[in-house]
Amino acid sequence: MNQSKAMTSIYFDYNATTPLHPMAKNAMIEVMNICGNASSIHKHGREVRQYIESARLHVAAYFNVTPAQVVFTSGATEANNLVIKGFTGQVIVSAIEHDSVLKARDDLIICPVTSDGIIDLVTLEDLLHQVSKPCLVSIMAANNETGVLQPLEAIAEMCQRYQVLTHTDAVQVIGKCKINWQQLKFDYISISAHKMGGPQGIGALIVNPSWSLRPQMTGGGQERYFRSGTENVIGIVGFGAAIRHCQMNDWAPIVQLKNELENYMITTFPKVTIFGINVPRTPNTINLTMPGVMNTVQVMHFDLNNVSLSAGSACSSGKVKTSHVLQAMGIDKTEIETSIRLSLDLQTTTAEIQHFIHIWKDLYDRTHGGVENRSIRQ
């Protein structure tokens, strides 16, 4: 590739949102032609209800649960709030949870993580010794900033021994990681459609029907009273189509691209840090530093060169703030402020990765002097 020529716009922010998959788009267009309220008992209402329940079946099938355990919400933020606020009892969460968990209540018990971003299981067990029942443990499946995967099996086993309920924000693993949800037996699972090729503004909470949650939205009693309000039919249908499709994804080529990029960076630029590199991560996420260069400068530099990436979570109203995730991992503030996140997708190409290196090296050279121009294996 001729790196002197600018490529068309490149998107490396798939952890923030993914493009709408054609199957989801087609399903949504089909239902747009249907008029009816799913709460109505006449023919038009029943027709719309069939679309909703068909999508519910697809979501339930992914997790191997019953359709009655699927509660549609506006997204994972609402799903997280529903379970964290709606649970009556003590709640233990990790220090690296999404803000929609950490800010849901002011009485959360925070469990620290290791320097690799893994939940401290020893401390978690100590906390479980101390808490009163009922108790809920909420640990995300994978971190949105680092991609670090949490030891869900160990967490589930420990919580079952102590007879406490479990919740996981699974947004970043759906369609990316093979997880035996039936074996884990988590009581609550939060998901969001737009992270897997579905539309924005729709998600779900998988619930344990044996435990009640206090609803956060009341009114018409939709979604079995967990979440009142007229259903987002178009979004739900797109969600159902997206979760069906994402089960077919093969991430092996992207893992290879990610590994080659990371190997190149740490070999060519020894002072670069890649967070979580020594532990299991999602196949698409890289969080790395450019020593001495603020992440805001990096993001703007890439944007001016038609490359979109982020300096952390994209759920903070466009603000770039110090990462609480990297802080919880014990990373120094000066290093945190030089970190950026790339999140790849199935259509990411070697040429795009090469272009990223070219743009990254251009800024690095301006601030650190020239470095030999190498490239990853084609």
Image (spheres, helix red, strand yellow):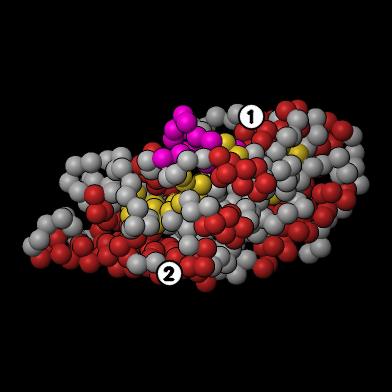
Circle number at residue 64? 2
Image height check: is 262 above or below 112?
below
Horizontally, residue 312 falls left or right of residue 68, namely right
Amino acid type of the residue tagged 2 in the rendering: Asn
Query: Is 316 in front, or is 33?
Result: 316
Q: Residue at x 30, y 62 (%)?
A: 68
Q: Is residue 280 above or below residue 100?
A: below
On residue 142, the disc is: none
Q: Could you tell me which secondary element the residue under label 2 belongs to?
A: loop
The residue depicted at 33 percent of the width and 58 percent of the height is: 209
Question: What is the tally of numbered marks visible in this picture?
Answer: 2
Q: Disc 2 or 1, which lies upstream in sequence?
A: 2
Q: Is 99 covered by the magenta stretch?
A: yes
Residue 322 — which label? Answer: 1
Q: Which residues are magenta?
A: 89-109
Q: Is residue 321 left or right of residue 329?
A: left
Judge whether residue 35 is colored magenta.
no
Q: Position of residue 134 (x, y in %)?
A: 42, 45
Left or right, 191 with respect to 324, comes to left
Residue nearer the viewer, 68 or 332 = 68
